[in-house]
Image: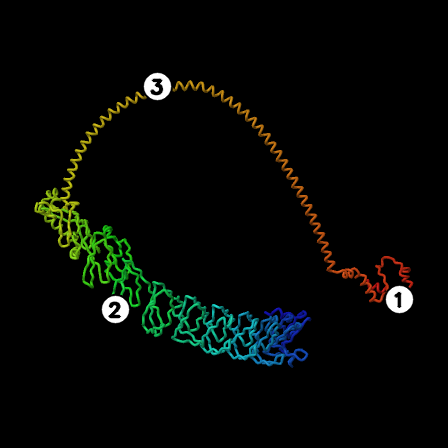
Amino acid sequence: MTSRKEDNAIFRIPPYYYIHVLDQNTNVTRIEIGPQTFIRQDNQRVTLGPEKMVVVPPRHYCMIENPVFRDKDGKPVIDQLGQTKLQHADLEIRLTQDPFPLFPGEVLKQPVTALKVVPANAALRIRAVLDYEDAEGEKRTAGDEWLFEGPGTYIPRKECMIEETIRATVIGPNQAIRLRARKECIDRDNIRRVTGEEWLVKRTGAYLPGAYEEVVDLVNAYVLTEKKALHMRALMTFKDDFGIVRKNGEEWLITMTDTETHIPNVYEEVVGVVNITPLSNRQYCVILDPVDDKGRPQLGQKKLVKGEKSFFLMPGEKLEKGIQNVYILGEDEGLILRANESFMDGQINRNPGDRWMIKGPTEYVPPVEVEVVLKRQAIPLDENEGIYVRDIKSGKVRAIQGETYMINQDEELWAKELPPTVESLLSAGKDPLADRSDRKSTDHSPKTRDKTRVVTFRVPHNAAVQIYDYKEKKARVVFGPELVMLGPDEQFTQLSLSGGKPKKPNLIKALCLLLGPDFCTDIIVVETADHARLSLQLSYNWHFETLSKSPEEAAKIFSVPDFTGDSCKAIASRVRGAVAQVQFDDFHKNSAKIIRSSVFGFDPNNKVRDKFVFPQNNLVITSIDIQSVEPVDQRTRDALQKSVQLAIEITTNSQEAAARHEAERLEQEAKGRLERQKIMDEAEAEKARKELLELQANSAAVESTGQAKAEAQSRAEAAKIEGEAAVEQARLKSQATKIESEAELERLTSAREAELKYLSEQNRMELEKATEMSNIETTKFKEMVEAIGTQTLQTMATAGPDMQVRMLQSLGLKSTLITDGSSPINLFNTASGLIGGLVPKRHRARDDDDDDE
């Protein structure tokens, strides 16, 4: 289907429109420009249009591809075939001009675009794509780059293209920009730069990088203070801002004495900010690897710096132990020192490894050759306190008691180790006499013992402790009350006694032995002659007999390790032997006698002795208490329980019968007393009834008379009260009326006075205002007149006539008359007959009048 445009034979082309017409015979396309009416022939075809011409407004441009050749007059060149000659594969930039059409073959590559306006502190980086020579005669080679700096409008060329827009970098105070050369060039300071070279620009203001310069970074200056310095390192050999040649890898400090602010060079880096090291007059420090005056580190050396002083640690320097305080020693303090190398300590030559001690009161700063091993302090000891001290040279240990002692350089505190059981007993802090019932408790938190202190133990009254010296191989017994202090080679004799019911071995751990009197309880099982097994709970009272406290007698007490278990076993064997010889009934009736006689035995008079002595350790049993006797066999226990219950029942029945008889007797006595009390109560009630009737009669008589009298009195009182109330009411009304009238009069008086005062004050203020305004106007006018001046006022007043006079003089007129033309004027008698005068003057006056109108 053919298009509608091909069907049309007439094309009306408006102004500033055009069409392309193809002649199919010659195959040449030509252009037709309006306004016109184009009649298409049969061999013609309109290939484009009507199209509006390209309009390039001011400050705009467009780019045409394949532009036409033009002659010297600017007309398109037509070749011999009759078609427009084109510059194929070429570009043409067209600026503001009259609307123009696109010839056949031309292409609008870039539409109409506004010209690029480059502001101040900005530039366009231009790159040449073709060799050409600019308007200034400078030859540009393809690949060259340059800047078009603002402010200005960039006119594009076909030989150039815009790479980027560059903005100026604002360099503030204490700032710099770091630049890098992308290619060999000359910077803005006319210094030749090689490719890759970096430099700083420190000028304050806006800096626009060149075509071959790129901004690496914006560098801020480091502000140096009295307490901060910069640690710098050279990245290569160069000369710094202070004119000093720095070698590659060299490190140095920049302080406030050098400069207040510092911007790092491109060939140096900031390792860090170094804070000042302040030392008071009571502080010192040791610097390792100090730097000499020439800045060279002295490796392996030390330098002592005493306060009061402040300094910066140079690169490579470090503090050995930080800032240390001066050792201030009191009278009870000392320092143990050791020499690390040979040096002269005053008049004394110290060799490496020497140890010595200085004592206070003094203050001491150790030299670099001296090491402070430790600080000693005198240990004050009471007469009941002590410490263990060991000589580090001989190894001898001794105990020091009852004095203030300071350990010297050849001594050290020695920790005395004790068996764990003894340690727990000492740290528990129990009283062996008062806390016997608390032996199995583990709730007490043990205290940590200072092992360098002399071990002390308080022996309670009537108790003994055995201490064995393993060095002397001797034992000593201490009787209480006494405070025991162990020597370096002494140990407690630990007691492991039987306990519980029945007795179990190694149940009680103790350090001291109680001498009694005391008791112990045991449960033993015996069997009678008739094979009745009984469980006896016996309690023994015991004590130790110490006739003399000689070492032999004292050691005899501790000869039996478990005296409770041995004594209970011996007593139990005797009791079993005695009970096995008697019947159950006999034992049940005479248990106490049988047991006591079996344990204590009989004297020559066939009487039971009163004590039982163990000669091995002088233990004496003084009495035996039979606390309970229970059959072991269940049948025996049941039979015994039945007999006991029967005896209890018989006793209970007899007691009930006796109580019953006594209750019946008491009941009869109570009934008799009750009858007598009833009769007495009835007689008393009759007497009370008689008195009540008499009182009722009297009250009735009094009531009848009293009522009439009370009514009369009440009426009289009521009348009197009414009259008094009326009088008081009238008096109060009169007072109220008087008060109201006085209050109203006072209110009106106050209102009138306030109104008069208000009006007078208002009038006074208005008067003052008017006075002030008049003064202001007068002053204003006076000041205005003074400011303008009398000469000026005179000139202003005569300005109009003077101006007219000068105007007439400039026109050369000696007299004139100005009128609006509507009022008749007698010109014959005015000014000596103006009409009758000179005619030329009249004509000039009329002309002047016309000019003025």
N-terminal of the pair, mark 2 or mark 3, is 2
Amino acid type at image mark 3:
Lys
Residue 481 is left or right of residue 66, and the answer is left
Q: Quadrant of residue 635?
A: top left
**Cα gap from disc 2 to disc 3, whole angstroms:** 123 Å
N-terminal of the pair, mark 2 or mark 1, is 2
What residue is shown at x 18% (from left), y 35% (from top)? 652
**Cα gap from disc 3 to disc 1, whole angstroms:** 172 Å
Residue 849 lies, with reference to residue 677, above or below; the image says below
The 10 Å Cα crowd at callout 1, few under 14, some 14 to 19, many 20 or more, is: few
Q: Is residue 603 among what the camera can see?
A: yes
Residue 398 lies, with reference to residue 539, above or below; the image says below
Quadrant the N terminus occupies: bottom right
Q: Secondary structure at mark 3?
A: helix
**Cα gap from disc 2 to disc 1, whole angstroms:** 157 Å
Amino acid type at image mark 1:
Pro
Task: In this rendered view, identify the residue nearer to me: 361 or 625.
Answer: 361
Mark sitting on residue 840: 1
Residue 435 lies, with reference to residue 814, above or below; the image says above
Amino acid type at image mark 2:
Ser
Q: Nearer the viewer, mark 2 or mark 1?
A: 2
What residue is shown at x 28% (from left), y 23% (from top)? 678
Residue 785 is left or right of residue 279, and the answer is right
The residue singled out by tag 2 in the image is: 394
N-terminal of the pair, mark 3 or mark 1, is 3
What residue is shown at x 25% (from left), y 64% (from top)? 398
Residue 507 spot, x, y in % from top left: 20, 54
Task: In this rendered view, identify the residue nearer to me: 103 or 358.
Answer: 358
Q: Quadrant of residue 101?
A: bottom right
The residue singled out by tag 3 in the image is: 690
